[in-house]
Image (cartoon, rainbow, N blue to C red):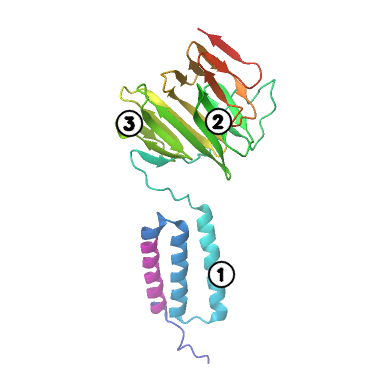
Amino acid sequence: MSDNSNKPGIGKRSGEFLLYAIFVVCDAWGFWGESHVLCLAVAWVGFLGLLLYDGMPWDRMRFQLAAGLVACEVIYNIAPATLPAESDTHGWLSPADDPTPENACTHDPWGPLVPSDAMVFIAGTNGAWTVEPGKSTVLKIDGTPFISAERNGSRLAIDADVFGDDAKLVARVIRNEFHLVATEYSYRERSEDRSTLKVFDPTGQEVLYIRYLNPHAVVIRGRFVTPEGNKAIISDQGISGTNISLSGFCTPQMSEQRVGFEIQGNIMMFHGPPLIIKTH
């Protein structure tokens, strides 16, 4: 007959796994929101401790530990990303997983087809895209860049500045991290997935809207005011400046010099194919 005296009993093993379950719950409560990697590493170390306490032979333990590593990797890959804590005036933009909507660049008869890996900015009925690896200027008014972007791995890094009518800074976005000046805006709205930011001035007017549709596409709206008081308004219908408006326009191969949407005084500077342009 085999000697089973050294094998843990059912009661002992049940108690061990109950303690480990409590350990995992405490681990998740303490570390999951801070770092998925740290939380899973602590859980794996706790699993190792459980096996050592259980007295499992090494030839069996290594397979259990390997299975634990695989389980940690699966959990890490399917778990949603850790989102840092936000405040009313500070937070981050994260991409959603929405399709890129139809825009002026989608069926541009004069321009090249938009590559699947291009980063696309949509301003009303207008569009601009690029595959350039460096920084691209999306919106420039009277020589001042207000929105720019560049690739950050498989995503976009967005920069933006918004000023009020009194030329005071209202909002600033630096590589998807936004800062709002508490005394210069009324309220803001956020989507649960953190892909959308809306900022409103004290009169309730929308001064900035950024919708990070997916890792390659962004929709923008807002009121952009230069230090001299000139304005460009981006709405769902298009872009309007002093005595001029722009709709149905596509800028291909946007770059730092080849600006997506540029206004100089009462002149719309365009860097693409023919466009629909209206003067008032």
Q: Which mark identifies residue 137?
A: 2
Give whichever of discs 3 and 1 has the lower sequence position.
1
Give whichever of discs 2 and 3 has the lower sequence position.
2
Q: Is residue 145 left or right of residue 191?
A: right
Q: Does 240 lie within the magenta span?
A: no
Q: Which residue sits at x=40%, y=74%?
A: 16
The one nearer the camera, 10 or 20, is 20
The one nearer the camera, 270 or 49, is 270
Q: Main secondary structure of the magenta part?
A: helix
Q: Which residue sits at x=54%, y=29%?
A: 138
Residue 210 visible in the shown view: yes
Q: Which mark identifies residue 66?
A: 1
* Residue with the most extreme bottom position: 1
Residue 63 pos. (x, y %): 57, 73
Q: Amino acid at mark 2?
A: Thr
Query: In terms of image quadrants, where is residue 257?
Result: top right
Q: Amino acid at mark 3?
A: Tyr
Q: Is residue 203 above or below residue 15?
A: above
Q: Amino acid at mark 1?
A: Ala
Query: Callout 2: few (<14), some (14-19), or many (20+) C-alpha neighbours within 10 Å?
Result: many
Q: Which residue is mark 3?
A: 187
Q: Which residues are magenta?
A: 12-28
Give whichever of discs 1 and 2 has the lower sequence position.
1
**Circle 2: element type:** strand
- Asked if the residue under mark 3 is in contact with the one under mark 2, i.e. CB atoms within 8 Å, the reply is no
